[in-house]
Image (tube, grey):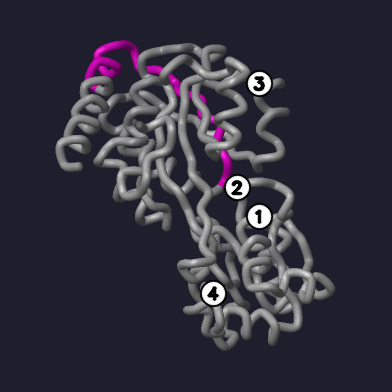
Amino acid sequence: MCASLHTTALTALTLIVSSALATAAEVRVLTVGSTQVAAKAIAADFEKQTRNKVIFTIRPPFDIDKELAEKTFDAIILSVPAMDIHDKAGSLAPRSRVALARVGVGVVVKEGAPLPDVSTPEKLKAAVLAARSLTYGNPATPNTSGAIAGDALAKLGILDEVQGKTHHAALTSGGELVAKGEVEMGFFNLSEIPKGVTVAGPLPGPLQGYTSYEAAVLPKGSMDKACAAFVKYLASAPAAAHWEAAKLEPATTYMPTRASR
């Protein structure tokens, strides 16, 4: 593991030095919101070391394809299933995919409200049944907090029972519902906790699911060396601390995705 981390970091830094020797470049990155805190912090380090500038465009998953069709980007950060689709379509530069991190789902309530005990499946079940209302994203969208939350409730055997008090809402609107006290309990990615809410705890182990993220170079972009350098740096050992600080697990800590084998 240590040797692998050293190799990854060395490769990333070698690319960084090479890119720094050239004229400073702009790297245009399209990413989903759940990775933006860590990615921006990593980009700040990258910019200090290379003189290159990283420009982010943040969009929800359902807007990514539209954005790609209308604008040109140099790199992309997406969840693994979406990356698979783009890879099969030939939309990614060959062998440029790198595994970055994954994030689990947490249970939230209004800031200042009593925190329910969600530490075990049984206690989570009791808390959900006792809550007057729930919110989470569209469970039909795979590899998202909504799908993971829906699956957890199904495993608890209460999905149908709580449908009548469940509001399916995107992160911003769902967070506002909980923050205003209009909905008692929500399920969100731990890296995207809205203002005005408090995390009662992550989904307990047997019910937890993860959204895994990767980065890749886009061949329709500039293909400047700086782009490849930044994508590699996102997965480097120095970047791991930023992923952890943003409540995501660096890819080196869990079973590797196809891209990192």
Q: Name the mark on residue 103.
A: none
Residue at position x 29%, y 36% in the image: 236
Which residue in the protein does label 1 denote? 147
**Residue 226 versus residue 249: which sits nearer the camera?**
249
Which residue in the protein does label 3 denote? 71
Question: In the shown orientation, is residue 96 left or right of residue 156?
Answer: left
Label 3's element?
A: loop
Image coordinates of residue 219 in percent, x first then y, are 52, 13
**Residue 88 versus residue 38: which sits nearer the camera?**
88
The magenta span reads 17-33
Question: In the shown orientation, is residue 233 left or right of residue 152?
Answer: left
Where on the picture, by quarter, is residue 13?
A: top left
108 is higher (above) or lower (below) than 32? below
198 is higher (above) or lower (below) than 102? below
Per the model, the C-alpha gap separating discs 4 and 3 is: 37 Å
* Type of amino acid under label 1: Ala
Image coordinates of residue 235 in percent, x first then y, are 34, 36
Where on the picture, by quarter, is residue 259?
A: top left
Per the model, the C-alpha gap separating discs 1 and 3 is: 29 Å
Residue at position x 58%, y 18% in the image: 91
Q: Residues within 10 Å of mark 1 (few under 14, many from 20)?
A: some
Q: Earlier in the sequence, mark 4 or mark 2?
A: 2
Per the model, the C-alpha gap separating discs 1 and 4 is: 21 Å
Image coordinates of residue 7 in percent, x first then y, are 19, 30
Label 1's element?
A: helix
Which residue in the protein does label 2 denote? 143
Image coordinates of residue 234 in percent, x first then y, are 36, 35
